[in-house]
Amino acid sequence: MQLSLQQLIPQPLREQVIGRASGVWQQELVLNSGEYVFVKAPSGTGKTTLIHMLCGIREDYDGAIKWDKVLMKGAKASEIASLRTADVSVIFQDMRLFPDLTAWENLEIKRGLTNTVSEQCVTEWMGALGMADKRHSMARTLSYGEQQRIVIIRALLQPFKWLLMDEPFSHLDQANINKAAKLIGDVVRQNNAGMILADLDDNSFFPYTQTILL
Amino acid sequence: MSGKPGKALLRQLLLRGQGKGRLWAALVALFIGNTLLLLSVLIWWNFNDLLYGKGKEEGVGNTYLIIGKKVTNNNMGLRGATLFTQEDIDSVTMAPQVQAVGAITSNHFPVYAMMGGSMGFSTDLPLESVPDSFLDSKPSDWNWQPGSKDLPVIMSSQFLDLYNYVFAPSQGLPQLSESSVKSLALNVKAGPADMAETFTAHVVGFSDRIGSVMVPQSFIDYGNKKYGNTGNNTLPSQLILKTKDPSDIKFTSFIERKQYSTNSQNLRWSKIRAIVEVVAGATGILAVLLMGIGTLVFVLFIELTIAKAQQSLILLKEIGYSPVYLIGFMVRRFVPMVTIVVLLSGSMAAVVQVWAADKAKVQGLTLHAFPGYPVWTALAVSAGILLLLVVRSISRAIRMR
């Protein structure tokens, strides 16, 4: 699945992005399937805005975003739902968990949507990220680090061709980053998918095929 | 291992804020509104059936009037001036509120009645006939064929009352019950003395509707043709009308304009009926209002439930749940509730109808034992509108979030 960005300008950041060198804003950019893309984004340059635009949460921008032939702005709700279920998965920086569901229920409500990953697999992944004992904890009672690990697992519970990550390890220590990166890398490879990781600083979490300055 | 299945989690996220108390209140409001709507249709349908029914029994609302041309100083000497011509009959048939017109035909030949024994008397006997459909009730032996010597007679109840309460006491004669009168036989001579025929007449019934002595139409036609001087062209001096609403101003002004005489006493029931119609109509308007309020309460309840689940709905869509799936989930939650309420309302209407039919029987009125198609049509229409509004409100509320 190919991602095309054409002359994107986020309306709330228009004054900041115009006239500034960027590999994304106001550019013609094509990302091919299977690419590992690191978007280096200093604070305030629109990193989260870009991720939200790519997955269709925001439409307040000029230009065009196309996933293959699906033009995101003005796409039907069913097209966007299909994209989010089968093609593009997201690790949100701001978690977006259901606070009144347990850690397991937050995963189950995503897993049940496509039913492509077994419960046993989810249990193993929770164990791999040190979350086995938090299974029945309410999401609102989890620490940011714990929430972030649940969000990472949730993003892997569907088939995808692209994995979008917005500062996915911002609340994790190095040991947990290593575990989470390994899990993500394994699942992305299983899906023959590409990834776009947006973060503040350079990193070597994954073998990126290109780095773009936002 | 898995904890709650997906649907249970969706219920927890989307329906948590609905509140059982509010849900029951909304369902009760819907049930009351829907039931009242059906009951108002039931009332209207039953009254309509009673007033205008064309079943085995005549609708109690149908009013029969006997009209004649007023005898005035100007026409009292003119032969045939008070007879109804075919043109007159046609204009009456076309008059407002008139449903049917029957000619009251009288005998234009001599008829003489005699009774022997201790009660012996003899008298000239004026006879009349009306088409069978205008009789209060048609006795089983109500027929006469040329050659038959038995002549069935229907007598006005007023005649018997006059005899029993006025004539018999004043003359020291015994009073007579209806059955005893029916057992008596009268010898009737019909026709001029040189060619008179003798018949044995039996009273086979009494009429509250027509105040004279009636014989089958075939007998009058036979006599008028054979002995009368008018042959087949016997014009009626009175007409009997079956009217829908004789209190209608258009009808009464027609009667006045034509200078016909009639019995205004019959108009009393029409006024009662008009009041009943107004009451039934007002009940219907009230029921529609209550149904509207009940529906509004339920739809607002659904929208409130969805508004309370707004954050969950947004997040569910962000992780891949399609609006169509979520709409389907909510519809499957609320539509069975609406269906059950509608079915309960229909059952209530059926129970009320069974009860009302039972009560009406005591009053001598016949109602259908089960609600008829107008009630079920109202049920189907109200259910259709209700389901449409519920699905529409769910769809709009989820799509806009």
Image (tube, grey):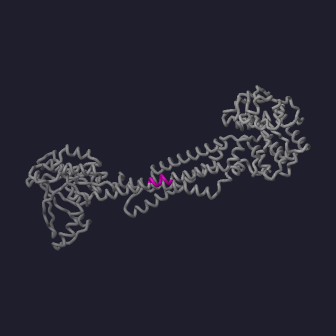
Indicate whether B279 appears above or below B316: below
* Residue B45: percent from left, percent from top: 42, 53
* Residue A184: percent from left, percent from top: 85, 38
Q: Quadrant of the C terminus of chain B?
A: top right
- The foreground one among B60 and B36 is B36
Q: Residue at x 39, y 58 (%)?
A: B366
Q: Quadrant of residue A174?
A: top right
- The foreground one among B373 and B32 is B32
Residue B287 lies in the magenta-colored region: yes
Horizontally, is B184 left or right of A165 in the view?
left
Q: Residue at x 58, y 57 (%)?
A: B25
Q: Quadrant of residue B158?
A: bottom left
* Residue B4: percent from left, percent from top: 75, 51
Q: Residue at x 84, y 31 (%)?
A: A36
Indicate whether B189 appears above or below A173: below
Horizontally, is A202 left or right of B44 in the view?
right
Horizontally, is B367 left or right of B105 in the view?
right
Residue A171 lies in the magenta-colored region: no
Which residue is at the far bottom? Answer: B172
* Residue B330: percent from left, percent from top: 64, 47
Tell me the chief SS of the magenta region.
helix
Q: Which residues are magenta?
A: B284-290
Which residue is at the far right? Answer: A175
Q: Is residue B147 visible?
A: no
Q: Is residue B372 visible?
A: yes
- The foreground one among B327 and A36 is A36
